[in-house]
Image (cartoon, rainbow, N blue to C red):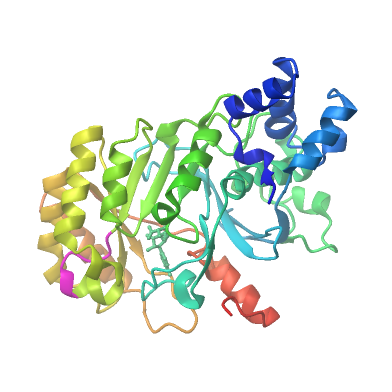
Amino acid sequence: MKSDIKSLTLDQIEETFRVWGQPAYRAAQLVGWLYRQLACDWGLMTNLPRALRDRLANEYTLNCLELVTLKEAADGTRKFLWRLHDGNMIESVLIPANPALYGGGSDRTTLCVSTQVGCAYRCAFCASGLRGWKRDLATEEIVEQVLAVERWYRATCKTPASAGPVSRIAGDETGDPEAGLAGDALSAPKFQQGTRLVDNIVVMGMGEPLANYENLLKALHILNAPWATGIGARRITISTAGLAPQIRRLADEKFQVRLAISLHAATDEVRSKLMPVNRKYPLRDLMSACKYYVDRKGKMITFEYLLIEGVNDGPDQVKPLAMFARRLGAKINLIPYNPVEGLQWRRPSATAQRAFHRALKSLGVTATLRQEKGSDIDAACGQLRLRTEAQQGSPLTD
Ligand code: SAH
């Protein structure tokens, strides 16, 4: 099977070209086409000799994501549903001007990327695991999510003045993108001509990132590289359901990405009900891996904590949660649950959310209550794909 050209680093392309007897500058030209021009067609690369283009086309694929639907929420969050070359579908979510949730600066345009088709971890509250795991994403499929959004952006929002929302559902052939551009400029991502749109990445889409470790790390290295998209490592956050051994492995990498842990409960009893992975790596193991990470990296980590009514929003969770956070110097993001069709879980009342938040803060931990984004477009993990597939009647697992 051919590998894809976007799974290669510049070093690897240079080495290939050396073996092929090509001058070194050709590799720089090629990555310029891939990551600056965002080309999806070898034929466009007119400054490469035809024989070289033919050879590249023979030996590598150049797969790009195909936009199936684009939904835009009232708050400017946009959710992209992509079709992969084998027909599988994945999602990415674009969040304009994200506040400093994961320790990075504010006012960034964040893209939430997926790492697997489906998910094997079957967290009880999550749409992604409902239809099981299908496959890991390849390196280039993770990288492409960023490139495809930039491609969409160039095609729809050509100038800073017109960087408003596109039609509510782009990809809808009847929508006139120009008509939508006159819309509410307040929700438009900040944009200066010549710059890229995405400058912050959260690996929190569909799938468990650390279960696709090699492909993810390689993709993040490419997205971080100055010859590709140049997104700073400190502006990349990986979120995990808590794979303790891989957290230790990540701690030993030189790469300084940020880490978020989907904690969602602070006792094994409650956490094992919500997240089957807790039976394999209970809180003791998870916290010890987190401690190792924090000590090795000298970096603050974040605990994500969904608030689910009557399940994990009671006073019994507050003390142990505060204790874990204090011990690790971790920050807590409280996220009101986004209901998923077919699941029984509910979001606590605003009063209950605030009470939980206050109780945590009174124990001396840093906690934020997230103003969740995009709930009107099924922006929570896995929700859009689930709905689209249900409508199309296509089974995800055989
Ligand atoms: N597997 C990784 C990344 C994907 S989940 C992880 O577990 O971290 C990304 C985040 O979305 C997690 O914190 C997850 O708990 C949250 N999430 C999933 N379903 C949700 C829902 N219905 N409402 C709100 N957040 C949800």
Image coordinates for residue 201, horizontal then vertical, percent: 49, 43
Residue 24 lies in magenta, yes or no?
A: no
Residue 55 seen in this snapshot: yes
Seen in the picture, residue 237 relative to 204 is either above or below; the reply is: above
> Where are the magenta residues, as a range?
263-269
Main SS type for the magenta part? loop
Q: Name the residue nearer the viewer: 338 or 237.
A: 237
Q: Name the residue nearer the viewer: 54 or 149.
A: 54
Seen in the picture, residue 158 relative to 63 is either above or below; the reply is: above
- Quarter of the C terminus within the rendering: bottom right
Image coordinates for residue 366, horizontal then vertical, percent: 21, 47
Residue at 76% x, 53% y is 180
Task: Identify the image quadrant of residue 357.
Answer: bottom left
Residue at 48% x, 37% y is 107
Residue at 80% x, 41% y is 58
Q: Name the residue nearer the viewer: 10 or 52.
A: 52
Image coordinates for residue 388, horizontal then vertical, percent: 65, 74
The quadrant of the picture showing ligand 1 is bottom left
Residue 313 seen in this snapshot: no
Left or right, 257 with reference to 341: left
Left or right, 65 with reference to 232: right
Q: Name the residue nearer the viewer: 350 or 144.
A: 144
Residue 264 lies in magenta, yes or no?
A: yes
Task: Identify the image quadrant of residue 90.
Answer: bottom right
Image coordinates for residue 237, horizontal then vertical, percent: 40, 44
Left or right, 73 with reference to 237: right
Residue at 48% x, 58% y is 373
Task: Report the number of discs.
Answer: 0
